[in-house]
Amino acid sequence: MRKKYKSIFLCTMSASSLAGRAGAQESIPVRHIVGIHDTPSSNLTNGICPQLYSTTVGAVCSINESTAPGSAKIEMDAIGKFDEKTYDDFHKLETKPTSELVQKFFSSKKFDSASGIATISSYFNRSHISFTPIRLVQAYYLTNPVFPEVHYIRAMDSILSLQHTFQTELQPLSQSFRPGQLLLSIKPWIIQRNRDYLDADLSDILAGTKTKKSSSSLHQDINIAVRYSPGTPWFRGISLSAKNLNGSRACADCDDHLLDIDTELRRTFQISADFGGSFPVGAFILGVGVESQSEDEAKTPAKLNATAVYKLTSFGFYSAFNETITKVGFLYHGDFYKSGIIYTNEKQVNTLRFERKNETFLVVGCSL
């Protein structure tokens, strides 16, 4: 199965050239999805600011949004690409992938994806619990217009997580030394995963013998983050995080299919620093980070992330980029609700194809 998948990318190559590619075993990552740990702030800043709030000194990145002692709040957030036509295409490819339909899609596009997440969170003093009843991802990829193949994947996840942050005020060594504070955040979480795969070539379509494969599993993991805030006017802090410490490879059957949406369950390490200041109107944050993702057999190259945020009283304007994606967007915080838009331009699929796509994601939420 893997040899067939790798050969379909370069249908104009000779048979000997295609055979030389058969040794590759890695599935193609579907990059453009809403992540299982995403908050509006983390999505808009490429993970550099998991939470972002305002204080008397301006905007501040945080590894956990805390509340005042004795207070609590409940928030509901949703992030997603809501495209009725895309979901209709998914349904047709899954249920009736006729040769005419596949050829029609080939005339306009070869890859598409949609995803969304809805989360309910309860925040307490340096702690919070969150429940994601659904995180939905769907993606399809068409290969080889001469002998078309349809590769389709759908994921439905439910996630429960706890988080507590321990805070320590460092003691000053001298009157001129500002020690700041040290934060340690521990986040155990559990995810129920359901996956549907469809990999059908032209002969499967014409003969009506296409087979959809399904799998379901439960995965437990833990994230740890440390943040040092020196208390200086411009250098807000430096953070070090390790995600999915049990995430050697949560998807046992991903390598049997061309598309892979579970790369985000691998162990991930990130170090980031953020800088900020205030103007008479508004405040800004600049952040940079380096992220490295690994698994048992391979290690992907480190990725550089950067973000810039400008916050007014209720509005936040965001931009972020790395080697595969550029984002711009805004987020409005009202008294009881929030809303925003994220515009993205992203390199799709893998290094063999340099297609880029423009997408629009919506952010909505409310606070109780």
Image (cartoon, rainbow, N blue to C red):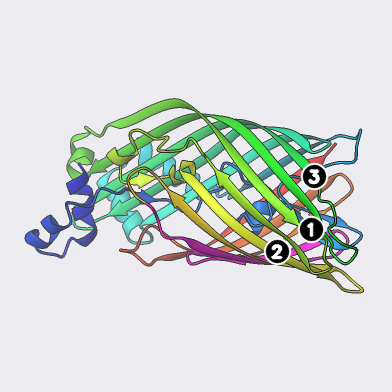
Q: Position of residue 103 (x, y in %)?
A: 28, 54
Q: Which residue is mark 3?
A: 168
Q: Residue visible at 65% across and 52% down?
A: 42
Residue projecting furthest to the bottom: 280
Q: Are marks 1 and 3 in contact (CB under 8 Å)?
A: no
Residue 210 in sight:
yes
- The label nearer to you, 2 versus 3, is 3
Give the image quarter of residue 146: bottom left
Give the image quarter of residue 236: bottom right
Q: Does the magenta portion include 324?
A: yes
Q: Amino acid at mark 3?
A: Thr
Dot placed on the residue nearer the N-terminal end, 2 or 1: 1
Q: Nearer the viewer, residue 148 or 36?
A: 36
Q: Amino acid at mark 2?
A: Asp
Quote the CA–CA distance across marks 2 and 1: 9 Å
Q: Does the magenta portion include 135?
A: no
* Residue at disc 1, secondary structure: strand
Q: Residue visible at 88% across and 74% down?
A: 279
Mark 2 Cα-neighbour bin, 10 Å: few <14, some 14–19, many ≥20: many
Q: Is residue 135 shown above or below 346?
A: above
Q: Which residue is mark 1?
A: 60
Q: Which residues are magenta?
A: 299-326
Residue projecting furthest to the front: 174
Dot placed on the residue nearer the N-terminal end, 1 or 3: 1
* Residue at disc 3, secondary structure: strand
Q: Amino acid at mark 1?
A: Val
Q: Which residue is mark 2?
A: 274
Residue 345 in sight:
no
Q: Quadrant of the C terminus?
A: top right
